[in-house]
Image: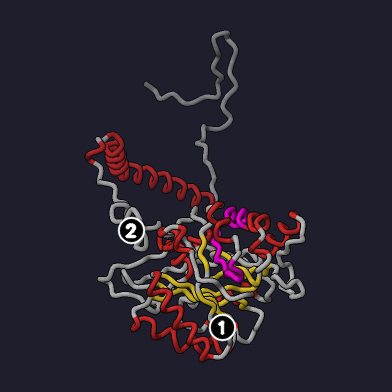
Amino acid sequence: MAQRRRTGRRKSGRNGKRLAPLSRPFRSVRIGLSPAAALVSALGVGVLIGIALAYHLLQPGLESRERRVAHLVTAPAKSLPPRVEVVPPDLPSESARSPFAPVPKQPEPPPRPGPNAAIAPPSRPAAVGSVRPSATALTSPAIRAAPSDPAWRRYAVPAVAPAGRPLIAIVIDDVGVNRRNAPRVAELPAPVTIAYMTYADNLQKLSAEAHARGHELMLHFPMEPLDRSVDSGPNALLTGLSESELRRRLTWGLDRFEGYVGINNHMGSRFTSWQPGMELVMEELRRRGLLFVDSRTIAESVGGRTAERYAVPHANRDVFLDNEQESGAVHEQLAKLEQVAQERGTAIGIGHPHDGTIAALADWLPTLQAKGFALVPVSAIVERRMQAGPKSAAVAAPPPS
């Protein structure tokens, strides 16, 4: 068959119309990319491939961890390790702590100095007359004092003495007026009971220094003497004052400083014989939890029996040490004090910050232990006499004021 040659005839469609001839043959479509675009595309494809590979590689590990977590959550309590509580080294555990030991606390900031700043009971060296550990001891109530106890117990200085030994307390009053001798009194062997005058200056500093040395503190309160021409001092308690003025003066004096166990009277031969005035004093001492030591400047004092009625702890002075201020005369009075202690079991001597008194006491106090006596704060004798009953307050007739 002869080969047909292509002609330029137009083919006709279904409707008989002819189709236009192709002007040129069919060509493939090309997409043109720049080199930078091509590089970006390649990087994107690589990242997607890397994510897919990482997921497949990590999937077994994630599933394993999820299974472990689910096991811990759903496991019974006994499979968990026991809980261990760590106790700080400075705080013993409850099982090891004594039921009577105080729970350690964080140290509190010291109180601001002022007339009402309390002084904590000191830690002091053993007093003259302290005992061997095997001896039976007399202990002051301060050792067992609780915050709710009255002030005379909370501020009492601890006292230790062998059973059966006579007890001696030395009270030095009028302290603070003679500024030169106040520090010398504090340097005496402890425990001496130091009674500071209400109107003395710098009481907080003086009393704190004496207490730090192991001495017990008292307040020496001025009261009216028989001779009204004698000035007993600022804010003294006088029989001619109204009740409101007496209360004001009492409050002023008792607020001068804190940390003392009680008061004794300065002068006061007239006032301590006046029942209404002493009732007012005892009412306030009971309210504040303080004790009373009657200086016994007059035999007719009602201080002791009024204190008894108001349940105020109290004791009477036995011997005045320095009506004569020379050291030799003071030594004679100290010998009388020893005799009273031997006869009654307790004795309270009152002296003043005179040079002769301080010198005599500095010589005498260190000899007490060898003589068989025990030097104690006055609070210890008050406690002993309270236990013995009212008869223990009896004293010999005191010298006139």
Residue 322, labelled with which disc? Answer: 1
Q: CB under 8 Å between callouts 1 and 2? A: no
Q: Is residue 389 visible?
A: yes
Is 106 rendered above or below residue 25?
below
Residue 391, by quadrant, is bottom left
Task: Tell me the element at label 1.
Answer: loop
Q: Which residue is mark 2?
A: 92
Which residue sits at x=64%, y=75%? 401
400 and 71: which one is in front?
400
In this rendering, position of residue 186 left or right of residue 242 = left
320 and 216: which one is in front?
320
Question: Magenta stretch: residue 213 in it?
Answer: no
Q: What amino acid type is highlighted by mark number 1?
A: Asp
Is 155 rendered above or below residue 61?
below
Residue 22, by quadrant, is top right
Q: Where residue 40 sits in the image (x, y, percent)?
A: 50, 50
In this rendering, position of residue 163 left or right of residue 366 = left
Q: Where residue 352 sits in the image (x, y, percent)?
A: 58, 80
Outermost residue, left side: 79
Q: Magenta span covers which residues? A: 282-299
